[in-house]
Amino acid sequence: MKLLTRAEEMLLIAIWRLQQEAYGVRIRELVEELTGQKWAFGAIFVTLDRLAKQDFVTSTLTEPTQERGGRSKRVYQLTVDGKNALMQVRKIQNNLWDGLENLTTETA
């Protein structure tokens, strides 16, 4: 299995956290909140499209709502492959960071 990019990982984590509220605007807000960085909608949707092509996420349209001017939301959900990809990258990161708990910027 191909390793996730950092952006793919962040979006999959955001989708997992948001569950039924995992649509573009909310995903962007959460990723910005968690990273402290601004994300362009284009970067979010290009990455979501790539994740869908890799079968890591699926999406469905909600019923149109008046608050959105009669438009639907596209809600994303992790697939089994998406969950497996996240678990794989977490295991790799845990292995890489194991034993580095005392990592600081101070010199010895």
Image: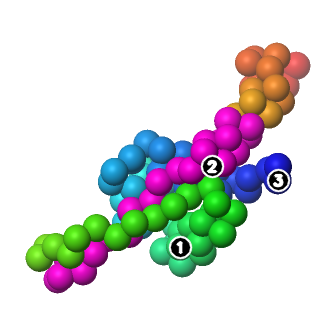
What amino acid type should be assigned to the residue bearing mark 1? Phe
* Picture quadrant of residue 63: bottom left
Q: Secondary structure at mark 2?
A: helix
Q: Residue at x 45, y 59 (%)?
A: 76
Along the viewing direction, whichever of 43 and 54 lies nearer the viewer: 54
Query: Badge 2 is on which residue?
Result: 82
Give the mark nearest the N terminus, 1 or 3. 3
Q: What kind of element bears circle 1?
A: helix
Which residue corresponds to the image point at 39% horizontal and 56% vertical from the top-left? 22
- Residue at (82, 16) in percent of width and height: 99
The type of residue carrying mark 2 is Gly
Q: Position of residue 79 (x, y in %)?
A: 57, 50
Please provide percent x and percent y for residue 98: 80, 20
Residue 42, horizontal then vertical, whole percent:
54, 78
Characterize the local packing of mark 3: few (<14), some (14-19) or many (20 or more) Cα atoms within 10 angstroms: few
Residue 18 drawn at (x, y percent): 39, 47
Q: Give the residue pinned by disc 3.
A: 2
Residue neighbourhood size for the residue with mark 1, other residues' Cα within 10 Å, grouped as few (<14), some (14–19), many (≥20): few
Toward which corner of the image does residue 74 lie, by quadrant? bottom left
Judge whether 23 appears above or below 18 on screen: below
Q: Per the image, is 81 magenta?
A: yes
**Amino acid under disc 3:** Lys
Horizontal side of residue 40 vs 50, given as left or right: left
Residue on which disc 1 sits:
45
- Segment tinted magenta in the rendering: 68-89
- Name the foreground residue: 59 vs 88: 59
Q: Give the vertical position of 8 relative to 24 (above or below).
A: above
Tag in front: 1 or 2: 2
Which quadrant is home to the C terminus?
top right
